[in-house]
Amino acid sequence: MSYHPASVIPIIKPSMGEPETRAASRPILSGWVTQGPEVAAFEKEFAAWAGAKYACAVSSCTAALHLALLAVGVRPGDEVITVSHTFIATANSICYSGAHPIFVDIEPGSFNLNPDLLEEAITEKTRAVLCVHQMGMPCRLETILETAKRHSLPVIEDAACAVGSQILWKGEWQKIGRPHGDIACFSFHPRKVITTGDGGMITTSNPEWDRKFRIWRHNGMEIPDELRHRSQEVIFESYPEIGFNYRMTDIQAAVGREQLKRLDGIVKRRRVLADRYRKLLSSNSDIKTPEEPSWARSNWQSYCVRLSADLDQKQVMQLMLDQKVATRRGIMCVHREPAYRQAGWRPRENGALRESEQAQEHSILLPLYPEMTESDQDYVVEVLKQACEAVQA
Ligand SMILES: *Cc1c(COP(=O)(O)O)cnc(C)c1O
């Protein structure tokens, strides 16, 4: 190989720079550093960008999911249907509300909830469906919504990874997060496509829920800081409900506004690189590239390839790291983690989550970020192919 990277090729690298630095200094110099005008502007701009009626900024997507579950009426003892094949925060948010996660298996091609398994998971205790657009790939929302509607169940979209992904909806391409379900939740963690350090956003068309999100994120206080700040008269606040501290800071929001301006360009570049991966890996029988259905446009938050079952995943990853290419193993299975095993969580029947487990054991995530050069990418592909051959030998 003639090309050698100067340092390890990372799995992701945030696209930030001078504009974000300048934006972050705005609230610092103004003295209003949390839940202020930058947050309000970020919410407005995000809603307009997504085509959503309301957008409420919070401290993380985990916080967003918690509030979404509370808004649709999830209470202790209820069941919420979701996937095990997800970041643990999806399931944790269900536990925060006192409800139990009910895990259904995924489709091997899309790594997303298999809608054919949804109906049989519904019981009289089911209160909501929490579906995930895993790694940015839209899940089969139309079928999920159809089934949920038949049982009068609200649908929350865990869109943590899916900012900038699109779905073909009634003949028109629409952004994930309008939302198509009842509520959608986004993450701005650095591992996602745009970042505010940490941060989250909740979109909905329901004004009552949006009002509640704003009270809950602010320890249950009824009067927003902004209103009290602007008022010429003395106002005493009240606390109608117990809330949380899920506020986003103005420093985060100022950075988020700059990130939002970059988003379309970031997604465009990620899609070009993902398509290049597909072509470069298409002839290799040991490596299966992910599928994008005709009705979905992924932001490719993660590029996940499946290795043939006889290849040792960890060995392949180690050989790649030895050659300065960082990878991650396939998405975790929440039901296999001690926290959930100790809580007594078990699949309803043996093998019920087989596809989820297989995906975790046999897939790896490859580096993908806008600044990645074609030479970097060619190098990753070469190193991956060599590692597969070496492990097989
Ligand atoms: C990252 C992630 C979350 C959590 O997002 P935070 O902003 O870190 O709280 C939730 N669900 C999924 C699917 C994720 O990938």
Image (cartoon, rainbow, N blue to C red):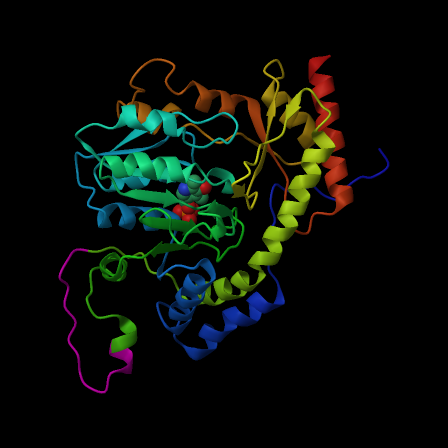
Magenta stretch: includes residue 230: yes
What stretch of residues is rendered in magenta?
A: 228-242
Magenta stretch: includes residue 85: no
Question: Where in the figure is residue 232, as x and y percent of width and height?
Answer: 23, 87
**Residue 264 can be seen, yes or no:** yes
Q: Nearer the viewer, residue 280 or 295?
A: 295
Question: Where in the figure is residue 40, as x and y percent of width and height?
Answer: 38, 69
- Main SS, magenta region, reads loop
Q: Nearer the viewer, residue 308 or 122?
A: 122
The quarter of the picture where the C terminus appears is top right
Residue found 62% across the figure and 67% down from its top: 18
Residue 147: image quadrant is top left
Question: Where in the figure is residue 98, as x and y percent of width and height?
Answer: 21, 38
Extreme residue in the front direction: 171
Establish if 103 lies above or below 302.
Answer: above
Q: Is residue 387 left or right of residue 12?
A: right
The quarter of the picture where the N terminus appears is top right
Question: Where in the figure is residue 220, as x and y percent of width and height?
Answer: 20, 60
**Residue 323 can be seen, yes or no:** no
Residue 43: image quadrant is bottom left
Residue found 61% across the figure and 13% down from its top: 310
Establish if 150 lies above or below 391.
Answer: below
Picture quadrant of ligand 1: top left
Residue 239: image quadrant is bottom left
